[in-house]
Image (spheres, grey):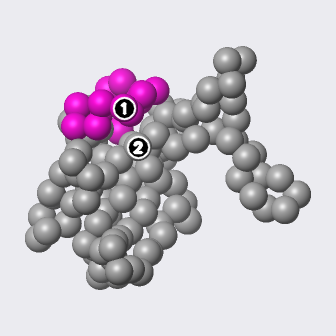
Amino acid sequence: MSKNDKTINNNITLHARNTLVGTTNRRGEFVPAKDENNKLVYSSNLGVTFRNADKSFEPPVALSADIVRNIQKSFPKIKNVSENVDYVIVDDSITHFKATGTKPEALGVTYKPLAADIALESLGL
């Protein structure tokens, strides 16, 4: 557990970070994008790890704008967060990690900002 992890319930802790922008090369390896100063480029998506979460744990399908704001306050290194926007799970982004000698069982999830046009589409507008 890192010093910034936040306990949410039943000893489950949350750690959040921005995900990297990048591509996959011919060997299937992720290659992160870099800017003109050779620094990594981060997306507005959030990678969230729920530690001590077994396979029965169901991550929230959406994070309200207020929750995202609180996560950003708890993890000051997070940048590029869409303001006043809810975040939803990216399809097929849930990954279960088995416990190891030094790390507890965990669940990794990626959330993306909910764009206004997607919200309107889901309402049939």
Q: Using the image as rendered, state which of residue 54 and residue 125 is in the foreground.
A: 54
Asked whether, in this view, residue 111 is left or right of residue 55, the answer is right
CB of mark 1 within 8 Å of CB of mark 2? Answer: yes
Q: Residue furthest right?
A: 26
Name the residue tied to disc 2: 17
Name the secondary structure under disc 1. loop
Circle 1 residue? 77
Amino acid carrying mark 1 in the image: Lys
- Is 69 located above or below residue 37 in the figure? below
Please provide the residue range marked out in magenta. Answer: 72-86
Task: Report which quarter residue 104 is drawn in.
Answer: bottom left
Question: Which residue ends up furthest to the top in the rendered image?
Answer: 36
Is disc 2 placed on a helix, strand or loop? strand
Q: Is residue 108 left or right of residue 34?
A: left
Q: Quadrant of the N terminus?
A: bottom left
Q: Is residue 73 located in the magenta-colored stretch of the structure? A: yes
Residue 62 appearing in the image: no
Q: Is residue 27 left or right of residue 56?
A: right
Residue for point 48% across, 70% down = 95
Task: Please tell me in which quadrant of the rendered image residue 59 appears.
Answer: bottom left
Q: Residue at x 32, y 26 (%)?
A: 84
Residue 125, percent from left and from top: 51, 37
**Measured along the vertical axis of the image, is residue 20 above or below residue 7?**
above
Q: Is residue 98 left or right of residue 56?
A: right
Q: Is residue 30 visible?
A: yes
Label total for image: 2
Closest to the observer, 73 or 120 = 73
Residue at position x 22%, y 37% from top?
74
